[in-house]
Amino acid sequence: MDDLKYGTRNKRGDWAPNATVEIAPFWAWPPALGRVLRWLPEYLWPWNAFHMATALAYWYLVVPDVETARTLTPGWILWLYAVNALAIFAMYGGIELFYYIKRVQGTRFKFNGKFPAEQPSDVFWFKSQNIDNFLRSFFVTIPMWTVIEVAILWCHANGIGTWLAWSDHPVYLALLVFFAPFIHEVHFFFIHRAIHWPPLYKWIHSVHHNSINPSPWSSLSMHPVEGFAYFAVGLWHLVIPSNPIVALFQLNIAGFGAVNGHIGFDKLELTDETALDSHAFTHYLHHKYFEVNYGGDGLIPLDKWFGTWHDGSKEGDAMMNARFKKRKDRMKEKESAAASM
């Protein structure tokens, strides 16, 4: 595919799409029903459908029965960790293999023209972003995912929380499934914004942001505190009436869905004529500029409301730079006032 039909490449080899990032169309005024109807299939397919498929597979093939889950024993806990780890290895590793090791589409649609393997750095374990990110994912963050997963299943088995049956509440639970990505986005925005507070950023979130040029293994490369807070989105299903399948769906949005923002490509070419949209550009801009796009793709436009939205345009650059300048000017004023006292 010719990526220059869809975007531009600068002198450094970095590619950017022509289309700017937009918030979900139902926030538009006046309402645009046609846009919403066109957006709906993209919202459901393929990513959210995939996450629901994995949730169902987990429930029917992986999760222990209620009697087993009532007691915390190493066997089923390690089993869940193994499944999570193998699933992530298969999904993330497959993308890494084809697009970062074999490089089957070269740098077409790649936001950063370089590959992490070409950029060794002392900030990473063994000076390798790939090794560092891989180890942190499998020995830090996936265990945190498993801890939250075990807690939810144990609570369900022991009657802690309000758990509803699909046969009794099909409409409510279907709506909860539909809005689970919204819950993820709100949760992610606020915990993400919190760990950008300088003290927390220095000790916690900087681990993730070392990967300025993210790749699939960067997705779950986190400090333990961030990993726990990130997957704690699943704990909302102990607060609201829910169903364990919906809770697993919520966790899998976080676990498998983390790769979307870190794929590094706008599109993954599947054939010469077809490609899969990654929806990665919004979060790539966050890794590039650090202080924009704390949330997701604009399902809930919290970044827009809080003034941290960047749509990838020159206007977005100008708004971001104006915000940075305003903050810098305020700091200078405070320093001047302190010096004059």
Image: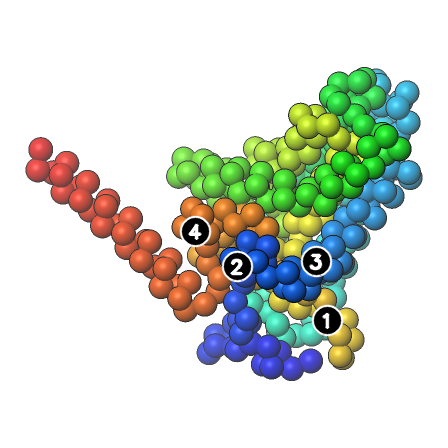
| Vertical relation: 244 (above or below) 184 | above
On the image, the x and y values in percent for residue 305 come to 45, 48
Per the image, label 1 sits on a secondary structure element best described as strand
Distance from label 2 to label 3 (Cα)?
18 Å
Tell me where residue 277 sits by quadrant. bottom right
Q: Are marks 3 and 4 in contact (CB under 8 Å)?
A: no
* Side of 174 relative to 227 (left or right): right
* Side of 6 relative to 73 (left or right): left
Distance from label 2 to label 4 (Cα)?
23 Å
Distance from label 3 to label 4 (Cα)?
25 Å
Q: Nearer the viewer, residue 85 or 25?
A: 25
Disc 3 marks which amino acid?
Leu
Read off the residue under disc 2. 30
Read off the residue under disc 3. 40
Read off the residue under disc 1. 275
What quarter of the picture does the C terminus occupy? top left
Distance from label 1 to label 4 (Cα)?
30 Å
